[in-house]
Image (cartoon, rainbow, N blue to C red):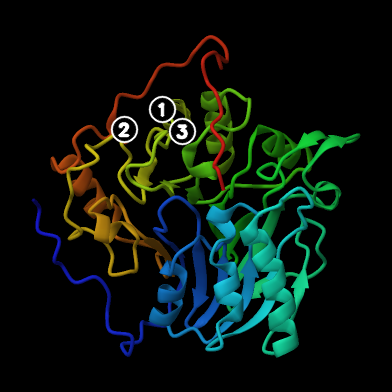
Amino acid sequence: MTNLTTPSEPPLGQKPEADLAVTVLDVGHGNSAVVRDGSTCAVIDAAPGDIVQRELDRVGCEHIEHLIISHSDKDHAGSGPQILLDPLRTVGTAWFNPDAQKDSRIWARLIRAVHTRYRRGGFGGHQMLHTETPQTLYCGRARLEVCHPSFLMAGTGPTGTSPTFGKLDTNTVSIVVRVHLEEEPAILLAADIDAVALKHIQENGQQLSAPVLVFPHHGGLPGKADPRAFAEELTELVAPRLVIFSIRGGLRPANPHREIMAGVRLAAPDAHIACTQLSVHCHEEKQLVSDRHLAVLPAAGRKSGRSCAGSVTVTRVEAGLRFDPPLETHLSFVDGGAVANPLCRLPIPGPRKGPDNVGHKEVPDGT
């Protein structure tokens, strides 16, 4: 078995540099990102577990300017209550939209946590978040631009009978955020949007271009739409240099879906593709890998020996953007024989004559 004993994180007392950065955290099956300007932080999605709080500890964050929960699924909201109720940190505003159809324990806990923390103090309160929200969201020199949903869609919420939109589910109305670092687009956090949401975004004229795309729904199927066509269209709109899939290694059905990967590679053949953990498409589930190539950041895949890129930090520097781990380091890991059959390195497929969704069945998150 590969030696997995490399150091994982710096001591908590060791303070990082005052970087302007976004860290896409390896949280397994879920999404979480921390935006920071030095120790001024914002959290966008909070998957279950302690990875988000460990990252906040690492950067010395005592105040969360914004806590954004894109939608009510557990893999995006699971640690929201713990973050809100943590007595060691204050919170500016919690941003999420109502979901009357969500009857889950975690969603009820999140709502109760907002109520409890507001009464306790050290919290600015809750607001809805949509493209017409009048307040501009800043985190130091970072600006958080809301690209979806519109007020009309957010106000309607998930429903089976909308006269304007028809059926809307939780994924369709999830909040999409484009993070600007020093007013330059850096990363698009696309939550779990589907083809209905993407069409709505385009109809509203929202710009999505960014050097980094965190692909929606962990690379799973986009509702009933053709997955390759959806991935190709979204990737063309974003035109990323780096595409990240936030996944849990060993999870079945396996993400990213092969047709999603095909669409991404068709639209951006030169883009670097990185999964946070190793998909079962790429590697034997029981064969562990070293974590020597990872950035020194909290990452859920370390203990399981399933890390691919792990947690990824995008930092604004004078020359543009710096990635940690460096893309060259991740590429060497993928191409160096540690990964058996990397899906991202298969030949780029040729274009098809038309969309084909035959045989594709969406599998619910179960979250």
Q: Amino acid at mark 2?
A: His
Can I make out residue 364 in this image? yes
Lower sequence index among marks 3 and 1: 1
**Picture layout, residue 106 above or below residue 8:** above
In the image, 24 versus 266, the foreground residue is 24
Label 1, on which residue?
A: 258
Where disc 2 sits, the SS reads: loop
Q: Residue furthest top?
A: 353
**Picture layout, residue 76 above or below residue 165:** below
Q: Amino acid at mark 3?
A: Val
For residue 223, which quarter of the picture?
Answer: top right
Lower sequence index among marks 2 and 1: 1
Label 2, on which residue?
A: 281
Q: Amino acid at mark 1?
A: Arg
Report how many numbered discs are placed on residues in the image.
3
Check residue 75 in the rendering and tell me which mark sits there, or answer none.
none
**Picture layout, residue 315 above or below residue 162:** below
Observer-side mark, 2 or 1, equals: 2
Label 3, on which residue?
A: 264
